[in-house]
Image (spheres, rainbow, N blue to C red):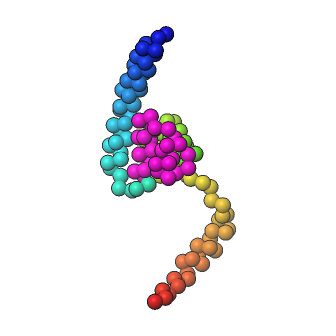
């Protein structure tokens, strides 16, 4: 295969991918317009950039996230679409505190008054 036919094949594939992702990109763009929450906007932005062909490492650098976080969100989107990306479905890292540790800590934090500001 000549270099010209290779280039044509690559362009045809890129055009197919662009058309295939257009519907997904439109959905993500619309969702990004609806959210005021910065974190949710960034999450949709990560998916948008990935659909545009940006690498997970580059997306992580742009958003100042860990690459594995970006990867996790992209895989979640691929498996379940936009509805799978709602915050009630995103668990994050498991808590390192047990319920027995959290309850006393929570009550202590709610019962103490803040330190006075020094002038």
Residue 34 point in image, percent of width and height: 32, 49
Q: Does residue 18 sit above or below 106 in this rendering?
A: above
Residue 62 point in image, percent of width and height: 46, 48
Asked where in the image residue 96 lies, by quadrant, the reply is: bottom right
Q: Does residue 26 sit above or below 100 in this rendering?
A: above
- Name which residue lies at 52% across and 51% down: 65
Q: Residue furthest top?
A: 1
Residue 21 point in image, percent of width and height: 39, 31
Asked where in the image residue 44 lies, by quadrant, the reply is: top left
Residue 39 point in image, percent of width and height: 44, 54
Q: Main secondary structure of the magenta part?
A: helix
Q: Is residue 77 magenta?
A: no
Tell me if 100 is positioned left or right of 18 in this view. right
Chain part drawn in magenta: 40-67
- In the foreground, 94 or 65: 65
Q: Does residue 13 sit above or below 98 in this rendering?
A: above
- Name which residue lies at 49% across and 36% down: 78
Q: Does residue 92 sit above or below 7 in this rendering?
A: below
């Amino acid at each position: 295969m000549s270099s010209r036919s290779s280039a044509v094949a690559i362009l045809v594939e890129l055009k197919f991918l662009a058309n295939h992702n257009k519907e997904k990109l439109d959905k993500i763009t619309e969702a990004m317009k609806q959210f005021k929450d910065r974190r949710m906007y960034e999450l949709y932005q990560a998916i948008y950039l990935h659909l545009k062909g940006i690498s997970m490492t580059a997306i992580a650098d742009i958003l100042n996230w860990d690459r594995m976080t970006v990867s996790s969100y992209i895989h979640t989107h691929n498996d379940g679409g936009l509805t799978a990306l709602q915050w009630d479905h995103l668990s994050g890292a498991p808590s390192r505190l047990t319920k027995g540790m959290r309850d006393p800590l929570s009550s202590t934090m709610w019962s103490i008054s803040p330190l006075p500001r020094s002038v």
